[in-house]
Amino acid sequence: MFGRRLRLARKRAGLSMRLLAERMDPKITAQAISKYEAGKMMPSSAVLVGLAQALDVSLDFLMSAQVDAIDGLEFRKHSRTRARDRATAEASLIDNLERYLAIEEIIGIPPAGDRFESLRYDSVATVEEIDTRADELRNAWHLGLDPVPSLCALLEEKGIKVIEDDLPERISGLACRVLRDGKPVAEAILISRRATVERKRFTLAHELAHRIIRSTGNPAIKLEAAMNRFAGAFLVPRRHLLEETGSGRRRITYYEFIRLKHMYGVSAAAMLYRLGQVGVLSSAAVQRAWRTYARSWRKAEPEPISGTQGFAAFEKPQRFERLVWHAIGEELISPVRAAALLHKTLDEVERQITGPAFQ
């Protein structure tokens, strides 16, 4: 455990063993670092503190054992993402999970377990079946046809640990299963704080799809394309969209595109794909759009959702912070511990405990 954490922190910092050894105080050799990472030797307390300082990580990150291992790590990333960026994102995920699982343990919340078992399908044979599975999930969760106000809140309610943090520019999110010694597997999704609201929602819906559909069972349908189709169908139900637009339209005006993307909380590009999938626009009309007015939509989002209202206000993970404040209120943790868990200053935490009247 310690060796893997040390290697991950070193890769995140972009350091070779030799360069890390040169930064260390107290001094150690690159050979010693190699033995630490291989699990052949453990550092002294002084060296452990020096490693944490040199790598700019907490001792909790290096030594905590809430997360035994992460399995099935899936990145939502640009194809040219560097190994160092992936290590940075993975380290962020582990650091956040350690704190998340720690506060659950302090409060006494039992592991969520697999809440998707009864909803999971081994395969889908057609794209139409993907839409059906998305509709069935909405029905099972009693969501109706209206847009989902917050994917973050929905997935947190269903037992997935949703985390938001600063990630490298080329990574919009990642997901994994969290393995814990002797405890049920936990599910986690990390999304980038810098991502647009539209991208956050689609990333979350895409990762939800991976938990519902194991494979396509059809060589003509690529798995990631199937997950995108499910995400679109879950966020923009066919029946609701047809009621809004009608079928067999000759064209959709720019005004309508913007209204629809803001209504469903998806990107203009995702909206264009979905209009073609449900038959509002013909395949020829969709292709013509990509060649003309929609050509720039893959790179720059037109009139993005912004501000602090609507989807922008609700599409943020909240459960972890709620648990920390609950623990403070019940005096299960100290303000100092809360500040460390929340990555806030002690002054900020104490101000939230007492309120402005007692400052």
Image: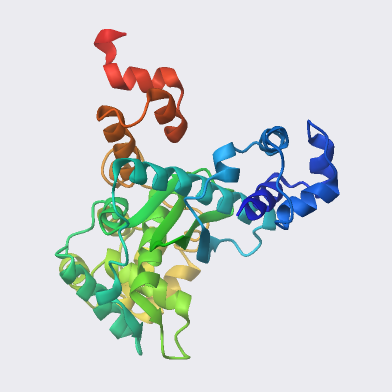
Query: On the rendered structure, is 71 left or right of 318?
Result: right
Residue at image location 41% in from the left, 85% down from the top? 216
Residue at image location 35% in from the left, 63% down from the top? 205
Q: Which of 70 and 351 lies nearest the eye of the viewer? A: 70
Splitting the image into 4 quarters, where does residue 275 fall? bottom left
Query: On the rendered structure, is 167 left or right of 232?
Result: right
In the rendering, at what x and y percent does residue 273 appear? 38, 71
Q: Is residue 101 above or below residue 331?
A: below
Q: Is residue 245 above or below residue 42?
A: below
Q: Which of 252 and 355 lies nearest the eye of the viewer? A: 355
Splitting the image into 4 quarters, where does residue 358 fall? top left
Can you say which quadrant of the picture contains the N terminus?
bottom right
Residue at image location 34% in from the left, 45% down from the top? 104
In the rendering, at what x and y percent does residue 22 appear? 84, 37
In the rendering, at what x and y percent does residue 78 appear? 59, 61
Q: Which of 134 and 157 lies nearest the eye of the viewer? A: 157
For residue 279, say whether it is visible: no
Colour scheme employed for the rendering of this structure: rainbow
For residue 214, say whether it is visible: yes
In the rendering, at what x and y percent does residue 199 appear? 42, 55
Can you say which quadrant of the picture contains the C terminus?
top left
Residue at image location 19% in from the left, 71% down from the top? 242
Number of on-image labels: 0
